[in-house]
Amino acid sequence: AQKVTQAQTEISVVEKEDVTLDCVYETRDTTYYLFWYKQPPSGELVFLIRRNSFDEQNEISGRYSWNFQKSTSSFNFTITASQVVDSAVYFCALSEMNYGGSQGNLIFGKGTKLSVKP
Amino acid sequence: EAQVTQNPRYLITVTGKKLTVTCSQNMNHEYMSWYRQDPGLGLRQIYYSMNVEVTDKGDVPEGYKVSRKEKRNFPLILESPSPNQTSLYFCASSLRGDTGANVLTFGAGSRLTVL
């Protein structure tokens, strides 16, 4: 069965520190997609990144970077030089490639609450 | 602006009083879904719809109903709300639902309190 584990419930850092949010997943499929979403205090869910299982290249977008390691079933998210505006709950999610019409579902982890203090 | 619109954003109601949370998207998306978010549990899928007139249960469907009569609308109906349905609800849509590649666009959320 699919499962996403975000072991860190809450993390608190001081501004400008680097922080890594961990995500470990389980799936039977060889083809799947991984996502990160951000939920700021205002409550909306904002898409950050999608990665397919065949692309293990790490990605960097400004201060954000993602490390996908199939060997350890992990898709970790690092924020470099964190800022107060990064304070949010971050969700990692998994979906399989082909639902076959049986279920269309994105499986979410329980989220990691990041607090960045000035 | 491409978006998913939910209403109401906030609602306090009493046990047993039927309510509907509306969801509308303007992106001509085939796939729509409802999630609920509870502390410590993350987001869990309630119902989803692959297209018009095609709906199915997610992981936590008990106590909810949905319908998809038009492509743009996917209302969530609580026929007889109970306090354990107090939660933050999200509607989401994506272009298609037959592949895990599609990115979900979420509504702003509806916070429901059942007394």
Image (cartoon, rainbow, N blue to C red):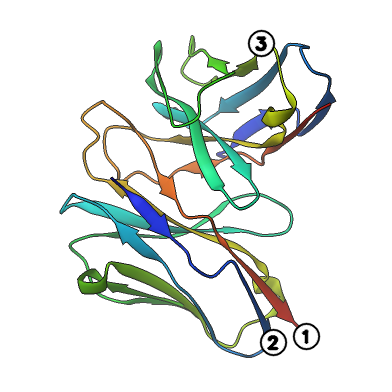
Residue at coordinates 34% horizontally, 57% vertically from top-left? A34
Query: Would residue B8 be found to the left or right of residue A37 on screen?
Result: right
Q: Quarter of the image holding residue B35?
A: top right
- Residue B50 on image: x %, y %: 36, 24
Q: Amino acid at mark 1?
A: Pro
Chain of the residue that carries numbered disc 3 in the rendered image: B
Estimate how packed mark 2 is, as few (under 14), some (14 to 19) or many (20 or more) residues with alpha carbons within 10 Å.
some
Q: Are marks 1 and 3 on the same chain?
A: no
Residue at coordinates 70% horizontally, 78% vertically from top-left? A116
Chain of the residue that carries numbered disc 2 in the rendered image: A
Q: Assign a secondary structure to mark 1.
A: loop
> Do tag 1 and tag 2 residues touch (Cβ < 8 Å)?
yes
Query: Would residue A25 be found to the left or right of residue B114 on screen?
Result: left
Q: Amino acid at mark 3?
A: Glu
Quarter of the image with the C terminus of chain B is top right
- Residue A27 on image: x %, y %: 25, 52
User: Which residue is disc 1 drawn over?
Assistant: A118
